[in-house]
Image (cartoon, grey):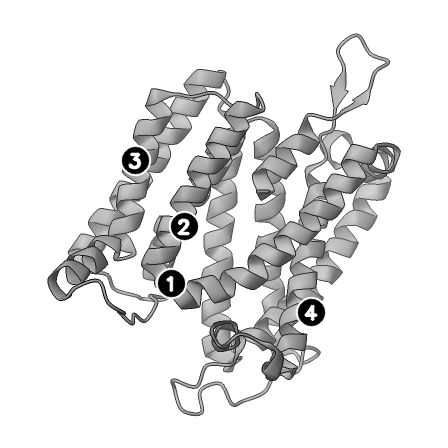
Amino acid sequence: MSIPLLLTFQNHQVVDHTTKSETEFAQPLLQTTMIFIGEILCILAIQLASKTPSLLDPSLLEAIQPQHAYGDHWTVPISPFSCSALWFIFPSACDLISTTLMNLGLIYSTPSVFQMVRSSIVGFSAICSFLFLTRRFLGREWTAVLTILVGTGWIVVAASKEEQNWFGPSLIVLGQLFVAGQFTLEEYLMDRFHVEPVRAMGIEGLLGTFLLGITLLVSAFVGKDWFDIRAGFEQLLDSDALWQSALALALVVAIFNFFGLAVSTKVGVPGRSAIDTTRTVLVWLLAIHYGWDAFSWLQLGGFIVLVFGTFAFNGVFASLRAAGRTGWGDHSESAPLLS
């Protein structure tokens, strides 16, 4: 089961039969809460697993253990309650905003557009790292980034023409910009304060809990429409389909994030790119099957361009060429920063 499919399932649940046109569930902030609970479960599992390495598969252990490639680079501890740790509130805020924007965009879009546009994070992250982290890229990598942006724009235009609605796809793209900001801030802060990835994840979890709690509290008193959190909780508890899918959503997020670390370490970035592409195709097919989506040649063309750019940037074609020259044996690869 995929996250956008679960979210779309919730968005199609009727919560008010009293009006002439049936009202469907539309609570992006509440859905963000469900996703955040799953992320917290994943963080807790990682923190626990890092303390009990004997219980883990070697590939998963390698993914969650602190990095030591830079000598003592990660050896300076930082407390979650120190002043330095408070800087991580900014990537936490970006995470909260991006997730809510994308959930809201999905209400007015389709699962395939949601899943496809998420792949554009490679291009947006590359641009942010160039602008704010002074990272440099080769000419072919910039060509790949441009291809990714063209493919993303193509998909958005195709979706907007099909549905006569720019609002949903545009919000999903805007959400990806905040994700790129989150990744850039995380990298800068981890390097600036010498924080190991697992510890940074825990700090962001604590600060994210604080931010989400404040947001829910404010929404409970002044929220309306999409952000009427009181009405959202009432609708959630009154519907078996909604509360059961909420539990499933949190569990799926936790499982995907936790084991995604092992998959990324095992197959490398090129392998993960292929997996993500396959997942997007499956999401599209299942969404069409359930009547939540439709096939579009125009959207397919944009998706092909996007996949081509993503594969080029992540080195999929280079890996295939190398494998063709040396045979299909084991090829160790260090993952690039942006993936």
Say which amino acid is labelled 1.
Answer: Val
Check disc 2 and report the residue beneath it. Answer: 275
Residue at horizontal 51%, vertical 37%? 172
Position of residue 181 relative to residue 331, above or below, is: above
Looking at marks 2 and 4 on the same chain, the residue that comes earlier in the sequence is marked by: 4
Say which amino acid is labelled 4.
Answer: Leu
Say which amino acid is labelled 2.
Answer: Ile
In space, the residues marked 3 and 4 are separated at their CA atoms by 37 Å
Residue 255, percent from left and from top: 61, 57
Q: Quadrant of the C terminus?
A: bottom left
The dot on residue 44 is 4
Please indicate whether residue 13 sits to the left or right of residue 273 in the image. Answer: right
The dot on residue 267 is 1
In space, the residues marked 1 and 2 are separated at their CA atoms by 10 Å
From this viewpoint, is residue 230 visible?
A: yes
Element marked by disc 1:
helix
Contact, mark 1 vs mark 2 (Cβ under 8 Å): yes
Contact, mark 1 vs mark 4 (Cβ under 8 Å): no
* 271 and 194: which is toward the camera: 271
> Which residue of the protein is positioned furthest toward the top in this rendering?
20
Residue 212, percent from left and from top: 73, 54
